[in-house]
Image (cartoon, helix red, strand yellow):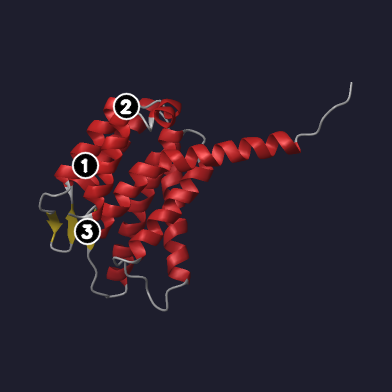
């Protein structure tokens, strides 16, 4: 089974077991919603990819369902910040890989993981709201992949985009599963740091 499938299944069982209850509660996400999201992404991710154009493919479980979830988050929050932070995180991830690439960066099975972890980290730091961080990380990852595809085309390099498919499916599953935890950890550490550095006024 693909790595992404296994990660989503683990996320499903962690959700229904109650181990993620505190994290989900802080993010304002119901346990049932998280469990359904994981199981849908896991099984629909096994379906054959859909070809948009000959060199662009999308996966239902790795792209369409997460994208739909992000759209719902944006509409419910009535904020464009997740989109703005997604552009920032995706750009940072792509530029980081571009700098350390000897030529024009072509997104491969190895670089997608780097792109994913950078978008996750940037989103966890920038976003105050946990759901917005999740949305930003997912959209930022897709944005970085699309930039890589367009950049390859502009430089006449054979390129293809497999959004949410293959290794990308594993990255999406990882982002979906750990972003809320990382965000919670970052906020906890930041809160403790600012409390310690806050000047104390003597009475």
Rendered image: mark on residue 113: none
The mark nearer the N terminus, 2 or 3, is 2
Q: Picture coordinates of residue 177 (x, y %)?
A: 35, 42
Distance from disc 2 to disc 1, alpha carbons, whole Å, reads 16 Å
Residue at x-position 13% and y-position 63%: 54
The residue to which callout 3 is attached is: 166
Sequence-first tag of 1 and 3: 1
- Which quarter shows the N terminus? bottom left
Residue farthest to the left? 48
Q: Is residue 63 left or right of residue 148?
A: left
Q: Nearer the viewer, residue 169 or 100?
A: 169
User: Please, is residue 135 above or below residue 109 in the view?
Assistant: above
Dot 3, crowdedness within 10 Å: few (<14), some or many (≥20)?
some
Q: Nearer the viewer, mark 2 or mark 3?
A: 2
Residue 64 vs residue 44, the one in the foreground? 44
| Label 2 SS | helix
Q: Which mark is residue 41?
A: 1
Where residue 103 appears, as percent x and y from the top left, is 39, 78
Which residue has dot 2 on it?
Answer: 31
Q: Secondary structure at mark 1?
A: helix
Asked which quadrant contains residue 110, the reply is: bottom left
> Looking at the image, do the residues carrying marks 1 and 3 touch, with CB atoms under 8 Å apart?
no
Q: In the displayed structure, would residue 168 be above or below residue 82?
A: below
Task: Give the residue at x 24% y 69%.
Answer: 159
Camera-side residue: 37 or 129?
Answer: 37
Question: Which image quadrant is residue 187 in?
Answer: top right
Q: Does the image show residue 148?
A: yes
The alpha-carbon separation of the residues under discs 1 and 3 comes to 13 Å
């Amino acid at each position: 089974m693909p790595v992404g499938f296994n990660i989503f299944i683990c996320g499903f069982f962690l959700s229904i077991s109650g181990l993620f209850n505190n994290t989900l509660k802080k993010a304002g996400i119901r346990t049932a919603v998280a469990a359904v999201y994981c199981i849908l992404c896991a099984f629909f991710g096994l379906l054959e990819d859909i070809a948009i154009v000959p060199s662009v493919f999308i996966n239902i479980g790795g792209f369409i369902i997460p994208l739909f979830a992000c759209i719902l988050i944006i509409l419910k929050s009535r904020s464009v910040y997740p989109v703005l932070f997604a552009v920032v995180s995706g750009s940072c991830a792509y530029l980081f890989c571009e700098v350390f690439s000897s030529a024009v960066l072509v997104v491969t099975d190895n670089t997608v993981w780097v792109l994913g972890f950078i978008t996750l980290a940037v989103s966890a730091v920038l976003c105050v709201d946990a759901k917005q961080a999740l949305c930003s990380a997912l959209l930022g990852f897709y944005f970085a992949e699309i930039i890589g595809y367009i950049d390859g085309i502009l430089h006449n390099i054979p390129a293809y985009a497999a959004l949410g498919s293959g290794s990308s499916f594993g990255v999406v599953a990882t982002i979906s599963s750990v972003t809320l935890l990382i965000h919670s950890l970052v906020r906890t550490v930041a809160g403790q740091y600012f409390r310690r550095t806050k000047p104390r006024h003597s009475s």
